[in-house]
Image: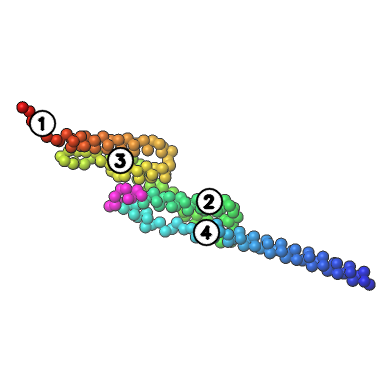
Amino acid sequence: MRTLLVSAAILASLFSCAHEISSDERLERATQKNDMKGNGSTADVVKIRCDDTNNELNKARNDSRPETDRLISYKELFDSLKTRVARFDEAMSRNPDLQFQEGSQEIVSAKDTCVQNMADVKVEFETYVRELVSVPTVQEIKGGSTVVVARLDFGVLREAIESLNPDDRDSLLNKVSNAEKKVDVKAEPRKKTGAAAAPAPATK
């Protein structure tokens, strides 16, 4: 009788342990599932939106603004969209199941919007940059003479080219450098003329 009671106690203990382990495993699986749905990267990516860019795009398109300012607006908007798309890609790379989970359609749709907006802005941005590179200087009348001046800040133009990083990036940068040299050459004679304006010594 005592043997039977001991055996029963052992079996009960084993069943209890097995049940306890099973509960832990279930809890762990549930926790992992919840973490996957609500981890930091997932929670962050859900908040990313690219349907709020109209104001910035209109600022870049506004041809009444200085060309340097317009170029800065295009660059900042393009860089921002590029960063948002990269965040989507990183989150989906870390968690490939992200786009297949419940509510994933909203994330996929938001990413598609970002990708499309980035592509559209890039077309306008690059078109504007190439226009500026093709005609980077203008002529102005100063002191009765025609001089060559920069159409915009060449440093900003270089940054825009670097941001776009087209296949002919080096060629575009060289054109900017050549234009900058022309402006410097035109500016130099004016300095010499001013220095040579001192009165000549009187002759005996």
Name the residue beneath numbered marker 4: 44
Q: CA distance from mark 2 to mark 4?
A: 13 Å
Above or below 161: residue 31: below
Circle count: 4
Quick check: can you spot residue 51? yes
Asked if disc 4 and disc 3 are in contact, CB closer than 8 Å, the reply is: no
Q: Mark 3 belongs to which amino acid?
A: Pro
Q: Which mark is residue 89?
A: 2
Residue matched to label 1: 201
Provide the residue span drawn in magenta: 63-72
Residue drawn 85% across the image and 67% down it: 11
Left or right: 103 in relation to 133: right
Earlier along the polypeptide chain: callout 2 or callout 3? 2
State the separation of the CA atoms marked 1 and 3: 43 Å
Residue 137, percent from left and from top: 28, 40
The mark nearer the N terminus, 1 or 3, is 3
Residue 120 appears in the rendering: no
SS state under label 1: loop
Q: Residue at x 40, y 36 (%)?
A: 170
- Give the Cα separation between the discs numbered 2 and 3: 36 Å
What secondary structure characterizes most of the magenta part? helix
Dot placed on the residue nearer the N-terminal end, 2 or 4: 4
Viewer-side label of 1, 4 = 1
